[in-house]
Amino acid sequence: MKKIAFIATLAILTSFSSVLAQAQKDTTAVVDESLPPGEEHAKAALERSPRHGEYADIQIPDSDAPVRTWVVYPERKDRAPAVIVIHEIFGLSDWVRAVADQLAEDGFIAIAPDFISGKGPGGGGADSVATRDDVVKLIRGLSPEEVTSRLNAVRDYALKLPACNGKSATIGYCWGGAKSFAYATTQPALNAAVVYYGTAPDPTQLASIKAPVLGLYGGDDMRVNATIDTTSIEMKRLGRTYEVEIYRGAGHGFLRAQGGREGANLRATQQAWPRTLEFLRKHTQ
């Protein structure tokens, strides 16, 4: 009986080890280093990155508080376009910095400003704020004029970098996606704007857009997607470029939450990122 019990226990342990190994294999398979990482893998991605990333304090006209900005350079022999990475309403996080790092891997100078620089305790930014909810409150307190002023300062800084080719674009996520779209209405010299699941500006503001816009949306994100049709119609009437991709089954924030929605968010990421690179290269190189 003891021998039978031992054999049974050994079989169970062997089976468990096999399942665990397969689970670990499956988890590893999900991490595709040609894509930005999901939130849970962001810190590790930054730690293993071979690229040069650094913080810069960018001065804003008529302000004593600079914008603390994460800058990552690509490894290439010629000059590169600058892409401003506009964070979610959750602020400048490891995940946003990892997205910037991936953009640098793909050939762009990636610049990710902390929009609540100077707004936190002691004049700090996102990393000085105790909770994510507090970060959200500070970001919601920003006026459109403050956001535009900070974007203009960051863009001016980027264009003066010796490694920059003189072209600029924005890319944003959620709150940042909406701000990426909105910035195109105020900056006529912008070369491209990418919008990840962000709402569109009021239709009356669209006439001032010069830059081509790419919108990338989760299919199950009706709050945001309700603005797409009206925007498409008006942009077409105005003769402006507004390219739209909607990913079936994906939810809001799919690039950050790649493990969500039974694989739909990952599939959306796998399609959206190459589409993003294609669009940016077409309009900035």
Image: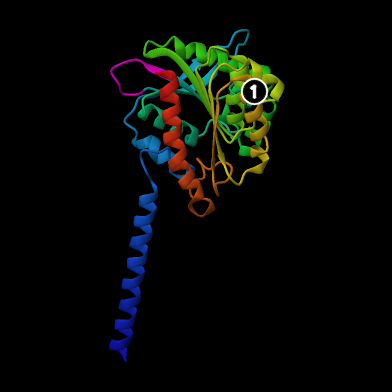
Judging by the rendered image, the residue that carries numbered circle 1 is: 237
Which residue is painted at 53% across and 16% down in the image?
A: 190
Q: How is the image coloured?
A: rainbow
Question: Quarter holding the C terminus?
Answer: top left
In front here: 102 or 40?
102
Of the pair 33 and 93, the residue shown nearer to us: 33
Q: Is residue 159 above or below residue 95?
A: above
Q: Which residues are magenta?
A: 74-81
Drawn side of residue 32 relative to residue 226, left or right: left
The reply, left or right, for residue 213 in relation to residue 227 is left
Q: Residue at x 56, y 39 (%)?
A: 217
Q: Secondary structure at mark 1?
A: helix
Q: Any magenta on residue 76?
A: yes
Q: Residue 211's quadrant in the figure?
A: top right
Q: Tell me what residue is drawn at x 61 percent, y 38 percent.
A: 132
The front one of 36 and 57 is: 36
Q: Is residue 169 magenta?
A: no
Q: Is residue 73 left or right of residue 187?
A: left
One can see residue 131 in this view: no
Can you give x and y, in whole percent of width and height, for residue 118 in the image?
60, 21
